[in-house]
Amino acid sequence: MKHIKTIETRNLCESAKKGGCGECQTSCQSACKTSCGIANQQCESTKESKENK
Amino acid sequence: MIHQYMLGGYNIVLDVCSGGVHVVDDVAYDIISMFETESREDILAAMKEKYVGKDGITEADIEECYDDVVSLKDSGKLFAPDTFEPMAGHLKAKTSGVIKALCLHIAHTCNLNCSYCFASQGKYHGERAVMSFEVGKQALDFLIANSGSRRNLEVDFFGGEPLVNFQVVKDLVAYARSIEKEHGKNFRFTLTTNGLLIDEDVIEFCNRECHNVVLSLDGRKEIHDRFRVDYAGNGSWDRIVPKFQQLVEARNGQGYYMRGTFTHANPDFLKDIQVMLDLGFNELSMEPVVAAPDDPSALTEEDKAIVMEQYEKLAMLMLDKDKEGKPFTFYHYMIDLTGGPCIYKRISGCGSGTEYMAVTPWGDLYPCHQFVGEEKFKLGDVWKGVDNTEIQNEFAECNVYARPECRDCWARLYCSGGCAANAYHATGSVKGVYKFGCDLFRKRMECAIMVAIARQLGE
């Protein structure tokens, strides 16, 4: 598209089908300890599949 | 729902429910802003009047751009509807009864006397105490017994200052390592320390056993030493910085956060980030102070404007440092657009009180470290487990759709409803909203996504 560049992202609707394994890090546990935000968490299952490539 | 903003020279459009991120030109930016409220004819007429003839833009360009927006909508990447609410409770219930992380309060005492400490100098408004090995061992057994099929278990050694009780930390890690394989578990240990007691023994232990180490440093010496003083009133900066440098070097610069707190004394915290960088630290976290509004260290509305500007400058500094070949990490700007959390995580939040609990030196369980000392939030203990199901249910019901204020917020699937402790302290309810924190969070997300875009586009 000439006017729009779409950045590659994880499709959240798709993740509803397979998500929820629960292996990811607890949000603020090992870092900030005072504010919740989950955007900076990594998905353990996509991390593993990336590492195995 | 979409969110549009301009930052760092980019026109950015976020599609909230699909997670889509788009960088657009001015024409597309305007078309998208009108798309849901105006007709095709009206939009095209307005765009032609505004843009045709400028920078060689033709009527055909504008019609093509409109069609692109329609195409993105049809493919579910723009204006995607929110279909998650009906499944919110179900998604959170997926982990019901499973605990995967504990914050062990190894010491409710500290060798520093920081007036801004949310844990009241480590005492959590109670008696000074250290955790015994027996209590810690029972906590680890409790975690394993309640972790279901979860393999990765997180344990943070926290305080107060955990290194005043270092032998128990070492003994607990040795115990956990001796039983993790037979139970099919993988413990990930972290340690949060003010640095005063770091020595060769601590460094060797951290590098062998700790997945992450959180090191408390507020940046500039005068800022750090304003609050982070010993009981004689002496600043700690000169004593801890060389120890932190030694520890980080021994870890090859990996697996740590240099974590600072900014307060009313330093809303211009970028200067503190710069000091951390100059000292050779590249994995950084800088947090707004958690304090009651009448506390002199609390951030004010006037500070907020400064902080917002600092966040934008920080984002630009990160990109400048990338170009210099000296990249650094800022915890709140870490965002993996392709490998980030699934929708379950985005809806469910941090897991406090359900997947995550704090353990006091006496073995009492609380929803998280920030609730320790608030007696009514005591969930149970590590021997008999959770028996205060009324309070636990309050936390189990915490999801992004449980907070009416989040419904219209574009950032809700990046923050998942925010911190229950911040909400409680601001509003008296764990299902409330800490609006000051929300404003800062939204700014951080805008900056984080802009940095990710710039990096992905290689500009």
Image: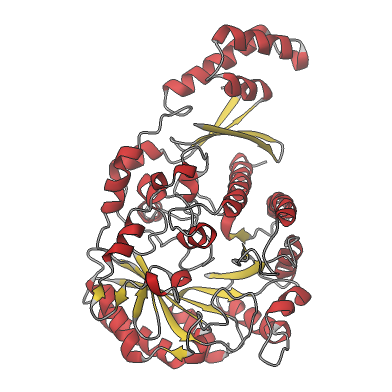
Above or below, B372 relative to B438: below
Q: Residue at x 61, y 39 (%)?
A: B457
Q: Residue at x 62, y 66 (%)?
A: B289
Residue B117 appears in which quarter of the rendering? bottom right
Q: Residue at x 47, y 88 (%)?
A: B127
Whether residue B222 is visible, yes or no, is yes
Image spot of residue B309 (x, y percent): 73, 50
**Residue B354 in sight in this render:** no
Residue A52 drawn at (x, y percent)? 36, 54
Q: Nearer the viewer, residue B264 or B107?
A: B264
- Residue at (26%, 53%) from the top-left corner? B94
The total of numbered circles placed on residues is 0
| x then y, percent, for residue B202 | 52, 87
Q: Is residue B132 above or below residue B349?
A: below
The answer to whether residue B77 is above or below residue A42 is above
Question: Considering the image in quadrants, where does the C terminus of chain B appear?
Answer: top right
